[in-house]
Amino acid sequence: MKKIQISVLIATFGFNALVLAVEKCPDTVPDEKIAQYKQAIKSFGGNLKQELQQAIQTGGLEQAIDVCNQRAEEITARHAKKNNFYLGRPSLKVRNISNIADDWESQVLQQFEQRKAAGEPVENMDYAQVINEQGKHQIRYMKAIGTDTVCTSCHGGQIKPELLEKLDKLYPEDAARGFNIGDLRGGFSISENMDACE
Ligand code: HEC
């Protein structure tokens, strides 16, 4: 009898301790998380740009297309794994169909387009939100990607014929063309599960 009471006590106490240990999820994304995401994106974006520049230098733009084609997904996966969150480069007009924006990303990219139309520079734009889907909390974050001169050689309105030929072959449904300098090319997107709160 005594034994049973004790074990009930432990069970009750243990359970309460567990409940107390689980914090309530914040409604807004903590600043330190945003700082961490910005840092991860800086490293990821820097890595991509460095590979691109190196490829252009060694084999010209045509060879750089192959490098983007073969390496971009691998680099993305490596940075996502290192940080233990989802990482993507969605756009409203994609070249690689595995970069198609999901609903949240698509809404945020549209919001960025509106902010750009209102005069905000693309480089500084970001957006963060805590999403609660059936009790499962997730942080979603997006940082805008602009278009500069080098990008227009493969994403602009006047792509050289030999590059176009190659792009057509690799991406028959390529929509990532016609961008001008300063345009919103897409975004770096992060989503991270918040397992330690509910
Ligand atoms: C040498 C050609 C080339 C250049 C230069 C280039 N890209 Fe790309 N880009 C590609 C290819 C090929 C893909 C598809 C492969 C991938 O990265 O997933 C791509 C994909 C992307 C994507 C993912 C969305 C999508 O359309 O699939 C973004 C974002 C992007 N590029 C941004 C840029 C930016 C910003 C620059 C300039 C800093 C740039 N690119 C320069 C060839 C290029």
Image (tube, helix red, strand yellow):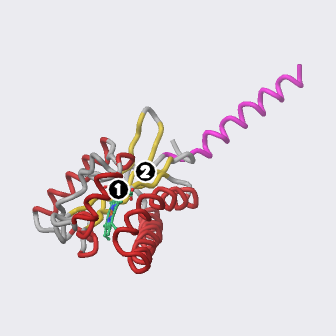
Q: Which residue is mark 1?
A: 128
Mark 2 C-beta to ligand 1 under 8 Å: no
**Closer to the camera, 129 or 16?**
129
x, y (%) of residue 98?
Answer: 39, 46
x, y (%) of residue 106?
Answer: 27, 47
| One can see residue 31 in this view | no
Provide the secondary structure element on which disc 1 rests: strand
Image side of residue 10 versus residue 91, left or right: right
Q: Amino acid at mark 1?
A: Ala
Image side of residue 28 versus residue 192, left or right: left
**Closer to the camera, 193 or 189?**
189
Image side of residue 72 versus residue 195, left or right: left
Q: Which residue is mark 2?
A: 139
Report if residue 11 lies within the magenta region.
yes
Provide the secondary structure element on which disc 2 rests: strand
Q: Residue furthest bottom?
A: 57
Q: Residues within 10 Å of mark 2 (few under 14, many from 20)?
A: many
Query: Residue 159 got which mark?
Result: none
Image side of residue 125 versus residue 64, left or right: left
* Above-or-below relation of 151 to 113: below
Residue in the image at 10% along x and 63% along y: 118
Q: Which residues are magenta?
A: 1-24
Viewport quadrant of the N terminus:
top right
* Above-or-below relation of 41 to 134: below
* Above-or-below relation of 91 to 33: above
